[in-house]
Image (tube, rainbow, N blue to C red):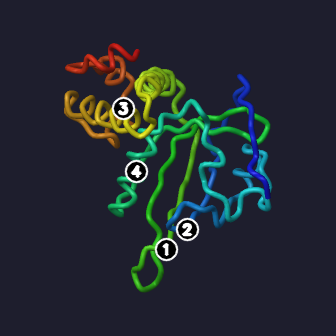
Amino acid sequence: MAKITITPTDKEHFLRGDDLIVSKTDVKGHITYINEMFRKISQFSDDEVLGKPHNIIRHPDMPRSIFKLLWNRLSNEQEIFAYVKNICKNGDFYWVMAHVTPSYNIKGELVGYHSNRRAPSREHVAVIETLYKKLISMENSYPNKKDGMNAAYDTLMNIMENNQTNYDQFAFETIEFYRNMDLSSNNTELRKAG
């Protein structure tokens, strides 16, 4: 199957409070299972995604540094919670709060990853969008994509450290925490990029 080219639109789809998107991948991130809600919101069929890299639904507004964080955590066999903007087959988009965990077989061997996604807090999405735009701007300010991703990742880690938190706490703290969080403290690079 040829690579699907998707042109993003400005139309957002929203999950209801009881909606649950589920997908599973192998250890390389290739999709092995999707549930009906995944099909419904993404507009992809099983044939179009099974065996394909999970990044088939990655929206271009997502910083590469967030996925570096995700894969760093998963490669250390740790779970992660993260806000993610995904793209639909027709270019529309939807936001989720993703919970990704390692999956093991009966022998305790890592066999892949399991992702549950629910509707995120809209107030938190507004703040996350601001952060993600700054991270993308930083990533794009470097001629080398990998250097940009690493610089944005380091910036994200500095933000967490300066605010005495980690990404999991950041993902679940109250809106007051987000409003008060200094997204550029001790980081002139982020201020320049934003």
> Is residue 136 found left or right of 116 in the rendered image?
left
- Which label was assigned to residue 184? none
The residue tagged 2 is 26
Residue with the mark numbered 4:
80
Q: In which quarter of the view is residue 135 placed? A: top left
Q: CA distance from mark 4 to mark 1?
A: 17 Å
Nearest to the eye among marks 2 and 3: give it.
3
Location of mark 1 (residue): 111
User: Residue 92 location in percent, x, y?
Assistant: 73, 32
Mark 4 nearby-residue class (10 Å; few <14, some 14–19, many ≥20): many
| Quadrant the N terminus occupies | bottom right
Q: CA distance from mark 1 to mark 2?
A: 6 Å
Quick one: label 2 or label 3, which is nearer the N terminus?
Answer: 2
- How many residues crowd around disc 1 within 10 Å: few (fewer than 14), some, or many (20 or more)? few
Whether residues under marks 1 and 2 lie with C-beta atoms below 8 angstroms apart, the answer is yes
Name the residue at the front extreme: 143
Q: Is residue 30 left or right of residue 128?
A: right
Mark with earlier residue (1, 2)? 2
Q: Foreground mark, 4 or 1? A: 1
- Secondary structure state at the residue bearing disc 3: helix
